[in-house]
Image (spheres, rainbow, N blue to C red):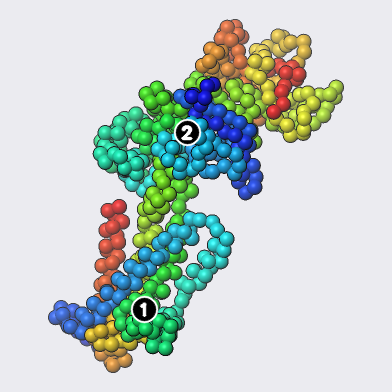
């Protein structure tokens, strides 16, 4: 990536809550006009990273450079340009129109915000005549989230940070939120950073996906992250016992609680145990979903094994030949030597 | 029992005929309470916001002091203000003893802890997402404070109404600092006390009714404001 395309550069970033580390990132660069996905379990630091990128919190250590310059909360260079939509929207105690127009009014360069507000409402599928004068407490969860998004879109932001925007909304609202966010990128070149568990959103739309675990980034792209407590077995192998007594077998971990990273390409999905390869460990599971991966055109199968979800990358031919579909019981095979440690 | 009924009838007569002595007390009360509530809101809202919004060393101790001052007796405030502004006191040269501004100083001291404590409580109960939302929408530091105050406006209104009620109905400060001087510093409450001592129940009841009417008007206005916003 060239310097001119660089939007964010994070150096030695650390952030603590009550002396407990929430984020530790040595270096991260985010380019302009990209869609970046953030993945990771609850408490992995996704929301904290978004707050830091939105400059609503100051990192405990390290610096964030925005467009090459060290930037802090309230800096003029980011005000009205970088905006964050939280998972639970907060609407101010005013009408829908006034909520959306707020950002334009405080920017004080737009005394007639009607057209911009109406356009933003249209983008998120809110009828002006029906919703404009509604009070903040007269909206459903999905409508409130769309009003909150419209309040950000009215700014025509350079960066739109979305923290699980579709987690607690209905399917129609989720579709409208996705559509409006992508339109912002298309029309204004808005960079999107999205923390979500929505696989479709991540793998069909994102240019890159960052995996977070315990506040650290464990690489990019599609990865299986398995956090341990590992126990030694035999022949230099270690294992973790899952809820249904199946065992995830790995090579010797650096420490008992190390994080194992397994490439989805290293996992084989078998519809029948007759296809079992000579070397490897097997886990039984059920296909939870099949998703198309935007960049490779491959199919990503999410297989639920006891209390964890594992992702395997497959060709569409294989999915077709093995007649794989959500709900089908399958066996996963992998070579423990293919495990990497985070 | 008869004197109470007679009192009510006389009260209505006094109000309808516009008795000058009654209206002088009403005017003094409204004037002095407006001064004191204005001053206490001016000082109390920023102080309450600071106390509720920010974390700093000694915050808990300050909060305990403010909450304790909510129970400050009016006669004690009257005594202290009297001591400070009397001729022998450190602020004696100001010459505000037995004047309406003198009473207003005492009533401001009475109202201030109420405004600070209730504003701080309203600010503390603000959703933590408000700050993130306002900053996300491009608010600067000044806009952050003003918009946050606007969000807790109902809490601040409640603080103002409570403080106004306390100030309007106090007797101790008005009596000690104002001296209950007819046509000059006699407020509704000191007039009621005097008239009751004289046995003029009708005038006392009439003044009491006026006090209730003012409180009613203030609450109607606040209710209207809440509806408008």
Residue B63: give x, y in percent of width and height: 52, 65
Q: Relative to A292, say whether B59 is above or below.
A: below
Protein chain holding label 2: A
Residue B201 seen in this snapshot:
no
Q: Residue at x 35, y 66 (%)?
A: B161
* Disc number lying in front (2 or 1): 2
Q: Residue at x 61, y 42 (%)?
A: A61
Q: Is residue A300 left or right of residue B195?
A: right
Residue B135 location, quadrant: top left
Regarding mark 1 in the picture, which secondary structure is present there? loop
Q: Residues within 10 Å of mark 2 (few under 14, many from 20)?
A: many
Q: Residue at x 25, y 84 (%)?
A: B184
Residue B228: give x, y in percent of width and height: 27, 53
Quadrant of the rendering where the C terminus of chain A is positioned: top right
Quadrant of the rendering where the N terminus of chain A is positioned: top right
Q: Residues within 10 Å of mark 1 (few under 14, many from 20)?
A: some
Q: Which mark is residue A161?
A: 2
- Residue in the foreground of this view, choosing between A290 and A6: A6
Protein chain holding label 1: B
In the rendered picture of this protein, how many numbered marks are placed on residues? Answer: 2
- Residue in the foreground of this view, choosing between A340 and A178: A340
Q: Is residue A263 left or right of residue A195?
A: right
Q: Is residue A214 left or right of residue A282?
A: left
Regarding mark 2 in the picture, which secondary structure is present there? strand
| Residue at numbered disc 1 | B170
Q: Is residue B63 left or right of residue B27?
A: right
């Amino acid at each position: 990536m060239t310097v001119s395309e660089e939007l964010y550069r994070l150096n030695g970033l650390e952030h603590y809550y009550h002396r407990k580390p929430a984020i530790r990132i040595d270096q991260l660069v985010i380019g302009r006009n990209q869609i970046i996905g953030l993945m990771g379990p609850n408490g992995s630091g996704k929301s904290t990273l978004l707050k830091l990128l939105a400059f609503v919190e100051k990192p405990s250590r390290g610096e964030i450079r925005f467009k090459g310059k060290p930037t802090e909360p309230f800096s003029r260079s980011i005000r009205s340009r970088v905006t964050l939509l939280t998972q639970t929207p907060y609407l101010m105690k005013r009408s829908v129109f006034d909520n959306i127009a707020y950002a334009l009014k405080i920017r004080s360069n737009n005394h007639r915000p009607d057209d911009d507000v109406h356009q933003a409402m249209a983008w998120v599928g809110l009828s002006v005549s029906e919703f404009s004068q509604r009070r903040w407490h007269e909206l459903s969860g999905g409508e409130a989230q769309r009003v909150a998004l419209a309040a950000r879109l009215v700014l025509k932001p350079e960066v739109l940070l979305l923290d699980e925007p579709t987690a607690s909304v209905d399917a129609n609202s989720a579709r409208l939120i996705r559509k409006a966010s992508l339109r912002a990128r298309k029309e204004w070149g808005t960079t999107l950073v999205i923390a979500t568990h929505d696989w479709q959103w991540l793998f069909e739309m994102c240019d890159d996906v960052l995996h977070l675990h315990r506040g650290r980034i464990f690489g990019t792209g599609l990865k299986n992250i398995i956090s341990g407590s590992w126990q030694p077995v035999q022949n230099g192998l270690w294992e973790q016992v899952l809820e249904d007594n199946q065992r995830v077998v790995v090579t010797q971990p650096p420490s008992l609680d190390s994080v194992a990273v397994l490439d989805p390409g290293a996992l084989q999905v078998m519809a029948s145990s007759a296809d079992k390869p000579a070397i490897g460990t097997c886990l039984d599971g059920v296909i939870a979903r099949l998703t198309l991966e935007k960049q490779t055109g491959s199919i990503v199968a999410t297989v639920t094994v006891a209390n964890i979800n594992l992702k395997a990358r497959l060709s569409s031919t294989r999915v077709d030949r093995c007649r794989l579909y959500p709900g089908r019981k399958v066996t996963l095979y992998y070579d423990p030597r293919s495990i990497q440690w985070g | 029992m008869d004197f109470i009924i007679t009192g009510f009838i006389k009260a209505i007569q006094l109000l309808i005929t516009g008795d000058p002595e009654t209206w002088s007390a009403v005017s003094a009360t409204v004037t002095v309470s407006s001064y004191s509530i204005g001053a206490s809101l001016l000082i109390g809202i920023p102080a309450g916001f600071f106390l509720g919004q920010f974390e700093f060393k000694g915050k808990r101790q300050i909060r305990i002091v403010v909450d304790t001052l909510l129970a400050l007796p009016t006669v004690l405030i009257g005594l202290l203000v009297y001591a400070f502004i009397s001729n022998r006191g450190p602020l004696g040269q100001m010459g505000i003893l037995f004047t309406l501004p003198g009473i207003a100083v005492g009533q401001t001291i009475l109202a201030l802890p109420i405004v600070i404590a209730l504003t701080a409580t309203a600010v503390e109960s603000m959703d933590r997402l408000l700050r993130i939302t306002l900053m996300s929408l491009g608010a600067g530091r000044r806009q952050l404070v003003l918009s946050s105050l606007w969000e807790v406006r109902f809490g601040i209104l409640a603080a103002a109404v409570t403080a106004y009620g306390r100030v309007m109905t106090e007797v101790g400060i008005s009596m000690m600092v104002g001296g209950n001087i007819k046509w000059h510093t006699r407020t509704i409450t000191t007039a009621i006390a005097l008239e009751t001592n004289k046995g003029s129940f009708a005038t006392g009841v009439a003044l009491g009714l006026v006090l209730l009417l003012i409180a009613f008007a203030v609450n109607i206005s606040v209710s209207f404001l809440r509806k408008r916003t």
